[in-house]
Amino acid sequence: MPVQPADANIVGSVSIGNHTEQSLGPAGVYTGKFENVKDVAFMTITVASDVESAAAGLKFQWSMNGADVDLEDGTKVGASIGLPGRAFAITPRAQFFRIRYVNGPTQQGLFRMGVVYHSSGTGLISRPLGRVLTDENFAQVVRAVLAAQRADGTYVNLQATDDGRLIVKVEGGP
């Protein structure tokens, strides 16, 4: 049977089914409770650990019935990627959601993880340009047509060759 933190609507609240500050031992596992997120616009997940998780150790799990995992997204967390803390803003992918965390090979001294459910907004995260960017960062997929401004103030679309190379014209120098 699906589990919710309370009979009341969870939107705009802190999850009690997917929150922990209990440190994990080597290869230790935390599994939250499925919560009904059908009325949630997006959720913020924050996690901090002083040691690395297992590969794809932070798992966002989605279910259509609140019992079986139908979809799972995972990423790495911890000191090995240069960020002891990570935050994610994601939109629901099914009616029920929970977190599963698998620790790496080292005992944690620090572990905090929680979820806040939001009733409105986009869930997009802004980041300082100097922040570390790795393959473990979640990303917004964008497909765009790029344009550049000419000296006369008009714009022209950038072009590529058939094999995907950017076409560049080098102007004469001094």
Image: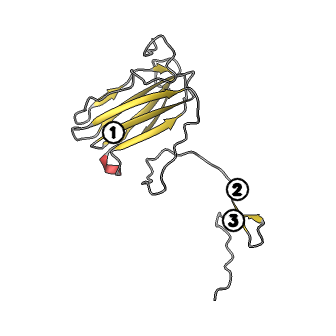
- State the CA–CA distance, disc 1 to disc 3: 42 Å
Figure check: 68 above or below 81 = above
The picture quadrant where one finds residue 165 is: bottom right
Task: Tell me whether circle 2 and circle 1 mark residues in contact (CB < 8 Å).
Answer: no
Give SS at disc 2: loop
| Relative side of 79 to 1, left or right | left
* Label ID, residue 160: 3
- How packed mark 1 is, by other alpha carbons closer than 10 Å (few <14, some 14-19, many 20 or more), is many
Figure check: 15 above or below 128 = above
- The amino acid type found where label 2 is placed reads Val
- The amino acid type found where label 1 is placed reads Ala
Give SS at disc 3: loop
Residues 135 and 128: in front is 128
Q: Nearer the viewer, mark 1 or mark 3?
A: 1
- The amino acid type found where label 3 is placed reads Ala
Q: Residue at x 45, y 28 (%)?
A: 116
| Relative side of 141 to 96, left or right | right
Q: Residue at x 67, y 53 (%)?
A: 144
